Image (spheres, helix red, strand yellow):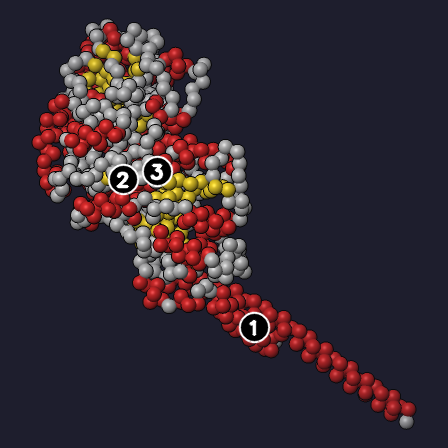
Amino acid sequence: MLSEGSSFMKGMALGGIFCLLLSLLGSFTPGMQSSPEDQHHHHHIKAPTNDELQSLSEPQMVELSQKVRVYCVIMVQPKVLVYWATAKDTWGKHCDQAVFYSSESAKALEAVDLNEQDEWAKLHKALKHAYDNSGDLRWFFVARPTTFAIIENLKYLVLAKDPNEPFYIGHTVKSGELEYVEYESGIVLSYEALRRLVNVFKDGEKCPERGRSLWKLSEEKQLAICLKYTGVFAENGEDTQGKGLFNSKSVGSLIEDGMSKNSLDVVEGCCSDLAITFSGMSPNQMQVMMFGVYRLRPYGHNFHDSLIFLPPDGSDND
Amino acid sequence: MTRQRCCDHSDKEELLETRRGREEVTMKGLSGSRCCFYMGFLVGTLSLYFLRQVWFEMSMEPDVLGEGQDSSVAALSKKRQASDSNNWRMEGATLINLNHPHHIGEDSSVADELYRKVRILCWVMTGPSNLQTKARHVKATWSRHCNVVVFMSSIDDPDFPTVGLGTGEGRDQLYWKTIRAFHYALEHHGNDADWFLKADDDTFVVVDNLRWVLSNHTPEEPLYFGKRFKPYAKQGYMSGGAGYVLSKEALRRFVEGFKTKVCTHTTSVEDLALGQCLEKMGVLAMDSRDTLQRETFHPFVPEHHLTGKFSKSFWYWSYCYYPIVEGPRCCSDLAVSFHYVDAELMYTLEYWTYHLRAYGYRYRYRPPLSQGLVERQAQTERPTVGTAGRGRTPAGITVGGDGDQSKAESGAKPLSDKGGKETLGKIPIDNNRTAVTQERQG
């Protein structure tokens, strides 16, 4: 009995050591373990305050407004054509350039055919294509088919940020030691971040087109890992009050959550006034959202924003 | 001798047996402890794995976002509770609004002025069984923007609070409730408001937009506004569900009509009956559409009007006084009401109307202010420009200046802080390029 007990103990001890060894081996970027470097990186990005914007001179504002232009990478599937049509007809019009990426080609679908079913490979190829075709656009926004984005609010968030610095922004989630941006609520990349990413893509070892680790990682985590190799870390996008700007649910869903929690102020606790994304929306909901965001308002309430965004040409639902 | 051998044999056998036995015992012991070893190994691995996860989550800085959001919401709700008692004065079952809701970072000077000039009493048709399921959400959302709010029920409820009209409940009581509610409003609050709105507990009203619609009219005229239907009445009548508003004079005439028996309880179809009474009393049914002829009062939810297709046999087609428009032009940007709004949509609409916006977005529709307000606006404009710091029109910012205008789907232009954007849109603007040019010249 004693021998059994002691061997059990021995087994436990050995198992623990084995586990630790495994985690050390399996942990990513052994070179990046240094925590002081981590602490240098801010994990939150806050939108600029009025004071910050007003401290800028006129020519500075002009320059910023001309620089902040967004290339939208919108993933679609030919199976659900209506999402492509809706994104094109609604929020996509507010991108400086909106390009659709599809897993396969289909008639009537105007999209870049990635010829790919694997999610990570799709993202990989789409981002590479976006980088090669970005022209002089310096910010990149990646969306899924059911995501609705308010691009003006995205521009506001990154207004004072230099796209020649690496930025990887969205709603961040922590998984163990890895902090990644949730795909469903939209991913924002600056030009520099994308450039570094495309560079590390060339290294088939660090960032292969087909994920190779022991456990199949989701594409959002894979992206975070690849970016981490290049020294780019995920940052949570927030408004000046600290409320998250990227949402993985629809407005209705978030309101419903607030109501079931019996919170005192359902609307206040829902979402930011300058929210950038909502997700899980149906095409009809997206059309109504256009009305809610770009049209419906109470008369007599004005915001003296430091920048003016003009409505897109040839559109009647915004 | 044989016996000895026998014994020797048996001894040997015994020895062998015991040795075998001992071997077996030790073998069993070995396999037993081996088993335990493997089990221990597994347990050790798993437990350390989970311990590691927990340790990491605990050692990481607490989710600042979560905390930040929670604490800011908690702080705001506390503030709201405290200020609620400062915002409302209860007079019997009436809620008198002292400070209508203000938003951080906004300039609501125009809205504030309209609040003072266009006083609205909102009465909400509800019942005891709807207080917690419907009326409560009205109370938490749009009714906070009225000058005076009264919840009309069949029974008194001092806690909610509601007024008891002394009727029964049910569809057949609707007109009785309406008659008594309006009488109550005139009797108790005739001096507290200029306009009297009736809404259901599943109607959502954007009261600020209602003030805009009414701002060009005077409450001393006998007028009434709403979603206009055409059958059964010469000048038409206003849909009950979409909400309708009576001017003070119209309300006086309504009450007078019952006093002189010109009007009586004819039918329980409340909106039609009221419309017919008002017609008899010389009250005018008005056109509440915006300057682009888009409807402001809506008898259905936004999704239905914006994306739905009404089947040609639907009664709606034959009822609408003005031509039905489907798609985005169905509804004015300055929509006043929607109907059949459930609890979730109430909050959603409040969020869309008063909270969610696109930063810096210049709306396509920027209607003119009414005359009286423009003059005042000019006076208040100057301080806002001064404090904002920029008085200069940006030089060198042209519409096409952003070189890739053809490629770019939206151009961003910094603009000096001009305060009252309302005054700029003197001409109803459809083509926004015209607007920008005008601004540069102005």
**On screen, residue A236 above or below A99:** below
**On screen, residue A26 above or below A251:** below
Outermost residue, right side: B2
Label 2: which residue?
B402
Which residue corresponds to the image point at 63% horizontal and 73% vertical from the top-left?
Answer: B34
Badge 2: few (under 14), some or many (20 or more) residues near its Cα, within 10 Å?
some
Q: Chain of mark 2?
A: B
Q: Is residue A83 visible?
A: no
Give the percent coordinates (x, y) of residue B283: 22, 10
For numbered disc 3, what is the local secondary structure?
A: loop
Q: Which one is nearer the viewer's eye here, B135 or A130?
A: A130
Label 3: which residue?
B407
**On screen, residue B202 above or below B74:** above
Q: Chain of mark 3?
A: B
Q: Are marks 1 and 2 in contact (CB under 8 Å)?
A: no
Label 1: which residue?
A11
Q: Chain of mark 1?
A: A
